Structures are given as structure tokens and as C-alpha cells.
Image: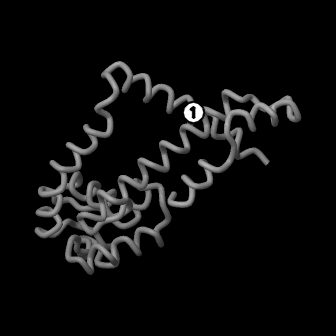
Amino acid sequence: MAILRPFVDRVVDLPALQNLAQLYPELDVASVEACLAFLRATADVQAALETHFARYGLSMGKFTLLMQLLQANEQGLTPSECAERSGVTRATITGLLDGLEKDELVERKPFPNDRRMLSVHLTEKGRSLMAKMLPDHFCRTTGLMAHLATDEKKTLIELLQKLQAGIPAMLLP
């Protein structure tokens, strides 16, 4: 995402878009402007989140895994469950788990009924980090959204769902 913001900022401005629209009738200026505004906001939020997570020695991926394990309680999760819930490959999860285990935030344990399988659990250090981090994280998330009224937040969710529905248009061959 770090490269996204400079790209979006330098793509085109409104007069350039209007000139391009004269050459390319399929160019809808409002659609491109909205897309660029969305990409700018996405890049800025992503950078802010990276800075926030770095305060705690985490990345977005590591935080996501810790949240999953916190919600799983004592049950833990298998690495494949973590991958499925995160929407990433097992190899990605293995790398994240290796880092979290090295930092003593999680531990892998053999499955009680099948020692070939592993379950992943938060350590006491991992629980302590989350207990320290989450109040700050939720306050910052609230601050991020503070300029939106409650009804605007609901509208934003609805609009983002509509935006997601258009993603296949970008993926067509």
C-alpha cells in the first residue's frame, strides 16, 4: 500500500480527466474521481494502521491472527483454520505464526486426539499484549471514524458493499 498513495496522487487531476474523457467516451469522470478518492483514503488508512500496529511490534496479519486466537479462547485454532478465516494461504499463516511464536505470543500444541495435527493458542504474553493493545486500538478506530455520524457510518458500509459488488468488472479477462 505504501506505493499506492504516490501513484494515486500523480495519476490525473480533474482537468486532465476531462481532457481524457473527450478522447475516451467510455471514461466517466465521476467514477474515476470516486475511485481515486477511495484509493487515497485506503492508502492513508493502511499507512495509519501500519504505524499503529508497529507500536506493538505487529503487522496487520499478525494482529488479525491474534484477534482470531483471542476469540477462539482456550480451544485454539488449527493453522488451516487460521488461513481460511484470514483468506490467505497456509504458507502465509506459517510465516506469521513463526514470527508470533518467536515473539512468544502464540504457541503450537499437538492435537489431543491426533498428534500429527497442531492447534495454535495465545500465550499469556499474547493475552497480555492484546489486553494492553485493544483499548488503545478501539479508541483509535473510534477516532478514525469520529467525523462520521452514526447514519453516515451505516451508509459508508452500504456504499463499500456496493463497491465490492463491482470488483468483478476489474477482474474480467
Secondary element under disc 1, as helix, strand or loop, is helix
Q: Residue furthest top?
A: 151
**Mark 1 surroundings: few (<14), some (14-19) or many (≥20) residues within 10 A:** few
Residue on which the image places disc 1: 163
Q: Quadrant of residue 49?
A: bottom left
Q: In the drawing, does residue 164 fall left or right of residue 113?
A: right
* Amino acid at circle 1: Leu
Q: Residue furthest front?
A: 15
Task: From this view, report whether residue 94 is shown above or below residue 7.
Answer: below
Task: Give how far across and how far down residue 128 sits, in percent.
Answer: 11, 63
Q: In the drawing, does residue 167 fall left or right of residue 60?
A: right
Between 94 and 20, the one lying in front of the other is 20
Task: From this view, report whether residue 169 is shown above or below residue 148.
Answer: below
The residue at 53%/44% (across/down) is 40
The residue at 21%/56% (across/down) is 70
Task: Give how far across and how far down residue 43 sits, in percent.
Answer: 49, 50
Q: Quadrant of residue 29?
A: top right
Task: Give how far across and how far down residue 33 sits, in percent.
Answer: 64, 33
